[in-house]
Structure formats: structure tokens, C-alpha cells
Amino acid sequence: MDANSRKILGLASEMNARFVVPVYQRPYSWGETQCAQLWDDILTCGRKRKASHFTGSIVTIQDGQLSEQGVVPLLLIDGQQRMTTISLLMVALARYANAHPTLVRTFSAKEILEGGYLTNRFRTGDDHYKLTLSKGDRDAYRSLVDALDEGVEPELDPMSRIAQNLAFFERRVTALDDVDLVWTGLQRLEVVSISLTQGVDDPQVIFESMNATGKDLTNADLVRNFVLMSYPLAEQQDLYHTYWRPIEQILATETVAFDDAFDDFIRSYLSVVHAPTSMAKVDVYQAFKRYVLFNGFNENDRMKNLSLKLRRFARYYAAVARGQVEDEELGRAFGRIAQLNVLAANPLLISLYDGYEHHEFTREGFLHMLQTLESYLFRRAVCDCAPSALAPFLSSLIARIDAVRSEGGNVVAVFTVMLLNEDDTPRRFPTDAEFAHALATRDIHSLSSALYLLARIDEHMEPTDTLVLEQYNWTLEHILPLRALHDEAWRATLGSDPERAFEGCVNNLGNLMITTHGYDLQDASFEQKQQRIAEVPLVMATDVLATQEWTPQSIRNRAERLVEQALEVWWRPSVAEGVGEEYRLSKRAAETRKVSFADLFDAGLVQMDDALVSVSPLHPGRATVTSTGKIMLANGEMFEDPTEAYERFLTSLGASADGQSGWMYWRRGDGGPLLDDLRAELA
């Protein structure tokens, strides 16, 4: 490592060097606040003729050899935001100098263009540009430099950071009386230039240490960098576009930023692979890093295999968290659970989806488990069961079901029994009697899932292919209004003790309706309420619209009818007599170590030099068992897990690897048993 103080313009204009922002770096993200701070620092330096200003560090590492044109590519490990912003400012100065040549004395557009600040004048292609950005910023920035070189107006997306920050600097430059101050100030900006030595210094360690300064890196930044940074620049591009970019496309939506979705996704993924250990409060990046190193994913090019697995689990996450799945019925089932906003359930759902994709149970069985879990979670919410007991219990279910999956057991039956076996504990599945009593007597208005409750009942009364809550922006409406005690007509309907009657029924299930209005009509007659309720066709509104008056008894009667519907919507499953005891053995299964390929090797069921043959007629191929009990593909890559090996085998052929279990697709030798059959011998 070599560190020294440098003028930033001197560093930027070094001959036969170009700065490359690696593909794993975040896009250009500085906003007006950061640009304004840099602008103020530059003007301060410009006005104080002997002053200089330290602006942080620029960390680079040489990647590869000299190009054919003799240019050295330097990867920007840290400092890309500053370098990009200063380059934009120089573009703004050059454009101003072109438009007002008589107003500048100390610099010119030609000097900026040909002085090595923006381009290597006599080089072509990538080597022509002194700065190469990553992702979508690359083309935008290059078009800006090209337009300046050609003397034309650039075509930029006005909403991009590059266009917005260029416009910011052009406004500031134009408004300045003495533009030469800017050029003078730029020449006095100093940085600590840190040059890393390839093979000696670890850029990832340096990168992590930089997270304490500037704009904090997200977990998505850190994980992406950790996955990609160990590869040379040429491979990073391929790895990013082939393996990582699909993950970003799966997780990002119009309303949810990738960084936000990634945090929850990677926490859910780690919860699955570490179950029953909870990941709720851990440092996600450090936990992911430990997971990679402990499992050796950073060795023998296995990071690509891990990226494939992350891509598959990202698809599971998008399905369970957003209902983003082609199967519409599964999507609705996931969507209903998501409406309960129980994030602790996501890892369990992802694990179950993985089992479904690997054909360990049927679609009907999967739907049954989803409906059962929805009932379990909602009944607990209504009955105010201890929420603190839920997360660790759901995490334990992942591990216990995983053991059953490895033994080829009946996952659907075991899942049901495990939920029902928690009676008289904080993890209980509330009975029909407890659930019905809570619905009929509690304050439903204060229930966070009250909208979901009423919408689901209406869906049940008249099933459609669309979730009711997705049709409109709903709010809760009190039929007996909140200001009923201030209205003589309403007080008359409340009986001899109106205050007590009002208190007992205003927030009761029978008195609530969902409405598309953004507010609750708090003082209106019953007729006005009926007119409002009739605006949106809801089946559950039929009895309200058909009655002539609304009394406490009307509310109790409606509550009873809605409770009957709720017991059908959120049913409590049952199992045949004796089945519960039979599947209590799953407790033993949970304590049994999952059978691995290494176990088959140790038991002699597979041996060194055995051939593993793909059973797929569309994708014939072979692998070999090594002397250390690993699976070696034809390209030399080695794996410990049959599924990981088969997924990589498929991708090497250009085929999709999603949902293909290596246990079911590798057989020992030509015509030999499946690995899954061999695994069963050790179960």
C-alpha cells in the first residue's frame, strides 16, 4: 500500500491512466447537498490564495496489465462520488468557457479537454475516457464528454443524477462574477491517494473501513461488493450481469428500492440457512460474510454457485413478500399472509416454497399449508397471543421441517401437527371458542389487521380472483357513529343506559364496515350511513342496507354472523386420531443431522471415481466423485452439495437451474440408484 498527499487535479490528469468504477459499486448518487458542500469548499480555496482543502481519500488498485494503447486501468475502490462530481464540474466549466471565452482568464475549454482531465486525447475506445462509471451511468457520462468534444448539446435523461448535478453546477457557474475562482479552487483541492498492491492488499478490507465516512453504504452495497470484488475486472462484468443483476431486477419494484428490499431479503435468507437461530437483530453484512467464509463459498469459484442460490431465493422472497408469482392462486395466498405484516413468517414461507419447487409436496399441499399458516397467524393476532414467542417458534419450524424434508416425510401433515401440538403454550393455535369469543367481544377497531379482517370475510362471502384490499384505498367506518351520544336520535336507539351501550358496541366487529372514503363520518344519521355504505358493492353490507334501524342488538346480531364467517375463513385444521402422536416423531427428526453427500461418501454409498450421471434426457452429462468426497464437474468445479453441483451443471449448459434438486437428478453410474434413494438408506 502506498499513500501520499496529492492535488486531485494532478491525480485525475495522470498520463496513460484511467479510473474505472467497478461494477459492484453503487451508481452515482451524490445529490445537491453534497454538490453544494463541494462547491463552497472550492470557492473558499479559490478566494484564499494560499489555502488548500483536504477532501478525503481516493483508493485505487491496478487491475490487469497495460492496455494495447499503454493505458493503466485503476479501479476506484473509494472516491468515485468525488471524482465523478469534480468531472461534472469541469464539464460545466468547459461548456461555460466555450460560451463565454472572454470571461475566463486562467483556463479554457481546450485545456480541460486536452489536458488529460476528462480524456486521454490520443487514445480510443475505453482508453479515451479518464473516468469510466458503472451500470447505467457509464453511457450517460460518456455521451456528455463526447458532446463536449464535438461541440454539441448532450442528450441526457433530465431525471438522472448526472444531468441534475451538471445543471446545478452550470447554474452556479453562470451566477458567479469571477469564474476563475472555481478553477483556482479546484487546483488546491487535496486528497490522500492510496494505491493498493494487487495480491498483497485486500481491497475488500479497505472498502469496508471506508464505510464510516461519506454516504453510508447499504447492506446491498456491502454484500454485492463482497461477492464481486474478489474477481478480476473482466470477470466482474460477466458475474454482475449474469448472476447479480437478475437479483436486483427481481427485488426492485416501482415503489420499493432495491436496497430496502435487499435488507429484508438477505435477513430472510440467512434465517433460513441458520434456522433455528434467529437473525432478527444481527448485523446482516457481517452475518452474510461469516456464512460465506464458513461454508467456503469464497473458494474454487463457488461464489457463482452462491449467487445462483441467492437468485433462486430472491424469487421465493418476491413471491412470499409481494405475491409476485405466475401461479395466481399462490399469489393470492401469499398476498393474504403479507397483509398481516408478520415479517417473521417470511423465512418459513421461503423455506416451504423451496420444498415445493423441489417437488417435496404437491401444489394442493402447499396451498393447504399457506392457508393454515394464515389462520394461525391471524387467530393469534385477534387473541392477543404473546408476539415474542412467534419469531423463535417459526424459526424452529424451519429446522424441524427441514429435517422431515431430508427424510422424505409428509411435510404437510407434520407442519399441521407441529402447529397444533403447542396447546397450552405461548405458541398455541387458538381454538374456535377462543377465536370466536375474542372476535365478538374485543375492540376490533384497534386491531392493526381490522381492514384485512373485514375484507377477507367479504371475499369469502363472494369469492373472486381479486383481493378486496387491492381494489380500493380502504378505511374503517363506524356504522353507529363516533359522535352518536351527541345526537338525540342515536341516543334513543341506545336504550336506557346510552353511555354504557355505546362503549360496549361502537368498536365491536358488528359495527364496523370498510369504506373507500378517506375519513370516518362521525356524526350522521343511519340513513346517511347506509347511503355511504351502498356506494361500494360489498356482500357484507347486505344486512346493514336491509335493516330499518341500527341498535346494539343489531350490532350483536351482525357480529354473530360475521364470527360464523370468520370461523370458515380462518379455520383450525384437524388431523385424524393418532396421527398427531405419529408425527410427534418429527421432534426426533429435528434432532437428527440432515444427511449430506459427505455422509454418503463416509458410508461408502458413493466412492472415489464414481460417476454421477444426469437423469435428464434434455441435459445429459456426468460428474465425478473426488477422493475427498466432493462432486467435480467436467469443467473442474467442485461442490459438496448435489443440488449446488446440478444447478451449476445446468447453467454451464445455458439451461435454467431453478427448482432442480440434485438429489433427484444425479444417479450413481449408468442405471444406478438416485442419490435420493441412497440418502434414504441413511435416514
Image: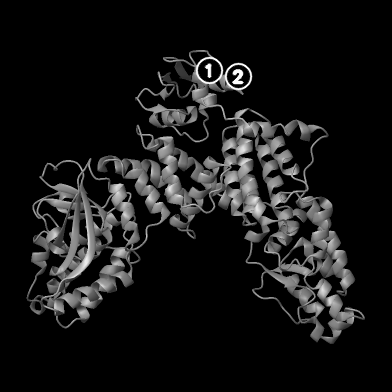
The residue wearing badge 1 is: 603
The percent position of residue 64, horizontal first and vertical second, equals 19, 41
**Secondary structure category for the residue under label 2:** helix
Q: Which of 170 and 381 is in front in this view?
A: 381
Q: In which quarter of the image is residue 497?
A: bottom right
Q: Nearer the viewer, residue 588 or 34?
A: 588
How many numbered marks have been drawn onto this rendered protein structure?
Answer: 2
Which of disc 1 and disc 2 is earlier in sequence?
1
The percent position of residue 645, horizontal first and vertical second, equals 44, 28
- For the point 39% across and 24% down, which residue is it? 633
The percent position of residue 272, horizontal first and vertical second, equals 55, 42
In the rendered structure, the answer to whether residue 157 lies left or right of residue 282 reads left
Q: In which quarter of the image is residue 647?
A: top left
**Secondary structure category for the residue under label 1:** loop
At label 1, counting other C-alpha atoms closer than 10 Å, the crowd grade (few under 14, some 14-19, many 20 or more) is: few
Q: Which amino acid does label 2 sit on?
A: Glu
> Residue 82: which disc?
none
The residue wearing badge 2 is: 681
Which is in the foreground here, disc 2 or disc 1?
1
- Whether 9 is drawn above or below 660: the answer is below
Q: Nearer the viewer, residue 546 or 418?
A: 418
- For the point 83% across and 55% down, which residue is it? 564
